[in-house]
Image (spheres, rainbow, N blue to C red):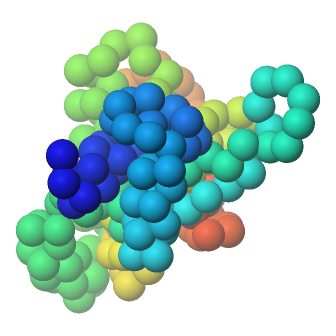
Amino acid sequence: MNGELQREAILEALRAEPAGLDTKELAGRLEVHPNTVRWHVGVLERDGLLHPAPELRHGRGRPSVVYRLTSEGAARRRDEYRFLATMLTDLVADDPQGEAYAYQTGRRWGADLGAAEPGSAVDELLDHEGFAATEEDGRIEMRRCPFAALAEGAPQVICTLHRGLIDGALAAAGSSATVERLEPFVEPGLCVARLGR
């Protein structure tokens, strides 16, 4: 497997594990030496496709360095659609009813997601769509936005679409909760949806 294929394999392994993997785990998945993984991880980090984070794991000793995809890394395979997505986002952003359309579209898709996977929690549904989401204490934290580049340029469209997506999924699950407030980019790589009734 050449270097480019090994880097793609690392990205693929991290897509399957939103919580991240350390060097040893990546080496096991790729069946290569950890030093090989370290070199490729350095290239991917330099290219802005993943970021390291120390994480205390089982046992004593220093924390492991766990690697997670950045939003750019998560979207890498979908680059061919970015131009189209940007044009459509601009179209919606320029329409006076654009936010309402975005919310209603998100709500329909959220309801469809909920109907397709009945019994799944909303954070699980979002997680399947690439948001690396968790729900706790009336808030949903999304640690990866599949559309971060678009959201930075047009949050009134993308974040409104995501608010509708969550509301639709909540309604499909029979919940009376809705998103009271969606807080984009609370910190790098973190958006928070605050729920109310």
Q: Residue furthest right?
A: 60
Position of 84 with respect to 168 (left or right) is left
Q: Residue at x 30, y 55 (%)?
A: 7
Front-most of residues 3 and 195: 3
Position of 173 relative to 135 (above/below): above
Q: Residue at x 9, y 68 (%)?
A: 80
Give the image location of residue 92, x and y in percent: 21, 77
Q: Residue furthest top?
A: 119
Q: Is any atom of residue 196 visible in this view?
A: no
Position of 197 relative to 146 (above/below): above
Q: Residue at x 34, y 50 (%)?
A: 11
| Residue 111 found in image quarter | top left
Give the position of the C terminus as an image quadrant: top right
Front-most of residues 173 and 100: 173
Q: Is any atom of residue 7 visible in this view?
A: yes
Give the image location of residue 26, x and y in percent: 46, 38
